[in-house]
Amino acid sequence: MKIAFVGKGGSGKTTLSSLFVAYLADACLPVLAIDADINQHLAVALGATEEEALAWPTLGDNMALIKDYLRGDNPRIPDAASMIKTTPPGRGSRLVRPFEDNPVFSTCFRRLGGVRLGVTGQFDEDDLGVKCYHSKVGAAELLLNHLVDVDGEYVVMDMTAGADAFASGLFTRFDVTFLVCEPTVRSVGVYRQYADYARDFGVRLVVVGNKVTDAEDVEFLQDQVGDALLGWLSASRHVRAAERGTARPITELEPRNLSTLRSMLTTVDAEQRDWARYQRQAVEFHLRNAHAWAGADLAAQVDPDFVLGPRLPV
């Protein structure tokens, strides 16, 4: 399953992402995590030091490697430079499994507490004023377009804040999107914006409340988001300790908050992916990009008879 965490800036996306990833890892479930937030705090939230996080290899800095590897022998793509972030796989493309060994994973991912973690990378001085953050996230989008995960495998992405995900087709790459929502008008506003944009694309959007302190907060969220609310996390000494740099086992999280993580996993496991729709949406956004800015000739990269899926050889 592919899972995204979104929400208003400061709502606790990274906190919820790291708790859910840690919950999966503690259950000995295979999890691949990707930090696609501009602030790049997921590694530290999962227990890395600041120094380790700064030294982590990035997907954004290895875009040429990623393109060259994923292109494989696809005859529709003459060279790696011709690929863009939305280029969909076709016959001859290299497909990847989330826990296999390959040059991309060896270069860009590292193990951290039972988790395979990759980061998109943050802005550096050369990027300021000349690039948008989606030039970094594009590497993750390209990888997800070629990633074949199967039952019992989990891919978790901590996304950019607000509705930034809609600047590309990345928002359609997930089986469940958890929107982290504080009990505030502004946070609910981001939920409504996200829900409105996602409505026509079959996105499974689930709200998880955060920073809930009392019954009034719960009532507010229930009134504002209705049945979309799965559960909530209340004030946590476990989380506060982590924010001060003291990592604790996920089993020491408060029982009420652990129950919410359990409900989230149950929700994820109940989903079934439509691989045909998954491929169709990848093609749709690639064609949008081709006609809008990348060049209409890139429409020729689409293999009309190809459908990504677990039965294909990798």
Image (cartoon, helix red, strand yellow):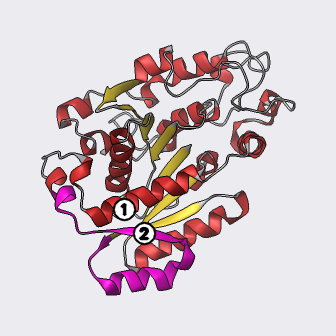
Give the mark nearer the N terminus: 1 vs 2: 2
Looking at the rendered structure, the secondary structure element under dot 1 is helix
**Residue 220 horizontal/vertical position (percent):** 41, 85
Name the residue tied to disc 1: 259
Residue at 51% in and 43% down: 134
Query: Can see residue 310?
Result: yes
Quadrant (top left, top right, bottom left, bottom right) of the N terminus = top right
Contact check, label 1 and label 2, Cβ < 8 Å: yes
Query: Can see residue 209?
Result: no
User: Which residues lie in the magenta part?
Assistant: 211-240
Quadrant (top left, top right, bottom left, bottom right) of the C terminus = top right
Quadrant in the picture for residue 41? top left
Quadrant in the picture for residue 144? top right
Q: Amino acid at mark 2?
A: Gly
Give the alpha-carbon distance from disc 1 to disc 2, as whole Å.
9 Å
Name the residue tied to disc 2: 231
Front in this rendered view, residue 183 or 238: 238
Q: Amino acid at mark 1?
A: Ser
State yes or no: residue 239 in magenta. Answer: yes
The label on residue 269 is none
**Residue 45 horizontal/vertical position (percent):** 26, 45
Residue at 35% in and 64% down: 11
